[in-house]
Image: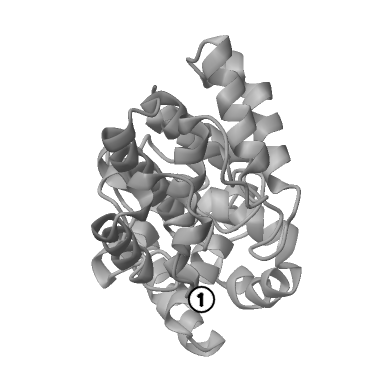
Amino acid sequence: MNEEKTVARILRQYRLNPFGTHGVSHWARVMENGLKLASYNGADENVVRYFALFHDARRRNEGLDFNHGLRGANLAKRLRSELIDLNDQQFELLILACRDHTKGKTEGDITVRTCWDSDRLDLARVGKIPDPKRLCTDAAKQPEVMAWATERASCRMVPERIWNLWGLKSLRFNDRGLPWLDREMVNRILSRVTCGFMPQNSPPPCPDKQIRDFLQTLTTMQHYNYRYRSEAIMEMKDTILPLIPETANTDVVRMWLALALALKDLYHMRRTKLAEILAKGVHRAIL
């Protein structure tokens, strides 16, 4: 399984904030929960890995969304030939696990039950402690396993595989699931993005993989912003557009809007303060 390729493909169509309650940090913890359980009970690790990535991949909101499991299963069907290396029997288990993971079932194939438990063990991220009566496997009910998973979920721990295996090396997250940006990273992003203002030619290829990853992340965030945060976009346009030369192309404008929203969400900045910081970045990069 190519985890990096699979995650990247899923994120291209993901409708919610990739760093939210049901985003990549949750997927990674679910995967590691499932692999831990599989080491106890012999569940199929390949099915467990794919379940972690697809079970919430088609959510439409962060709350009640009763059909998201079925939509995740249908996405897996659509992408099977492109991404999923499972035989027919394994694939049937994956579809069943995704489809029924919100229905509260506790009986079935050990691999399917392990998938369900791997998700339920991450409930502490939303303030709920897993109920042993609602867990499906003996492995998940072990006190040490529940304590391990609950501690990780309650602090919204971000597993290393997000950086090492999923290619998102530029990302760090705060406790609200937002990307963490220090001053150095902001300056590097500003310098890179403002290269797109130069009218004489296109920006040169970026040699820094961290920056490429971050720009791709901003693009993903902006798809979400345009769909679901129209008021925020209009507010940012009033602040950002005066800073951007008319020669900037559409992709550059979108990237700047995404960056501005990320900064505003993370640091609760006033628009005037945000504009001041971004203006300094533009001025420095252009001169």
Q: Position of residue 260 (x, y in %)?
A: 52, 70
The residue identified by callout 1 is 265
Closer to us: 5 or 75: 75
Q: Position of residue 227 (x, y in %)?
A: 74, 57
Quadrant where the N terminus sits is top left
Q: Image point 34% across, 65% down: which residue?
A: 150
Q: Is residue 207 above or below residue 140?
A: above
Q: Image point 48% across, 85% down: which residue?
A: 268
Left or right of 165? Residue 13 is right
Dot 1: element: helix
Left or right of 48? Residue 91 is right
Closer to us: 144 or 281: 144
Mark 1 nearby-residue class (10 Å; few <14, some 14–19, many ≥20): few
Tell me the amino acid under the disc marked 1.
Asp
Q: Residue furthest top?
A: 87
Q: Image point 43% across, 59% down: which residue?
A: 122
Closer to us: 226 or 78: 78
Closer to us: 220 or 105: 105
